[in-house]
Image (spheres, helix red, strand yellow):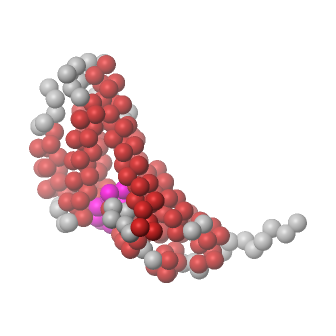
Amino acid sequence: MRTGRPREFDVEKALDRALKLFWRKGYEGASLSDLTKAMGINRPSLYAAFGNKEALFKKAIDRYVEGPGAFLREAMQQPTAKAVVEHVFRGTIELVTDSRNPHGCLMVQGALACGDTADCVRREMAKRRDASVTALCERFERAVADADLPSNCNPADLARFVATVMHGIAVQAASGATRDELERAAKIALRAWPA
């Protein structure tokens, strides 16, 4: 049985390079030529290993969520709701200001504004951002049930507030805000925490 020619490139490294390019340029800004050059492969190899550009982008997003964005999942394990939020803000600031990463957040900037042909990618990103809000809401509902948050607290509103600040931090970092500036902004946001 013929098995085909073995791949002559490291799929994991190629995916990491695609992730960085999408992070820097966004979905539509990263052309196939940009991607193949950054990944060190040709188009047939890209299609054979990853499918089309949209499939590659989704794999890059999965990698982002499991790698650089894993702090969000880790935050949900914190012992108090306030510690969750502190972890989220700290993780966001570290991610978006790390000199090894493009500034900003791939989940926020990767496909915010897309043409009609990429609308499915834009919707997928919105769905993933909404999943973060849902996870925060569920965590805050648990905190209300455990009396860690006041009973009159609205978990959905609080989750939306945290996501808004988190995404705002990413946008500010992409615009050049420093880590120190973002940390001060996060401290101000935490002053609004329900007592």
Image location of residue 56, percent across then percent down? 53, 64
The residue at the point 26 percent across, 57 percent down is: 170
Q: Which residues are magenta?
A: 99-108
The verdict on residue 142 being magenta is no
Image location of residue 94, percent across then percent down? 28, 54
Image location of residue 42, percent across then percent down? 59, 80
110 up-or-down from 36: above or below: above
In the rendered view, does 173 fall on the left or right side of 11? left
143 up-or-down from 49: above or below: above
Instruction: Check the image and name the residue furthest to the front.
Output: 116
72 up-or-down from 173: above or below: above
Image location of residue 159, percent across then percent down? 27, 37
The residue at the point 45 percent across, 77 percent down is: 31
Instruction: Check the image and name the residue furthest to the right.
Output: 1
The verdict on residue 103 being magenta is yes
The residue at the point 44 percent across, 54 percent down is: 124
101 up-or-down from 155: above or below: below
In the rendered view, does 47 fall on the left or right side of 115? right
Residue 90 appears in view: no
Image quarter of the N terminus: bottom right
Image quarter of the C terminus: top left
Residue 187 appears in view: yes
In this view of the protein, which residue sits in the foreground, 39 or 50?
A: 50
In the rendered view, does 44 fall on the left or right side of 79? right
Magenta: main secondary structure: loop
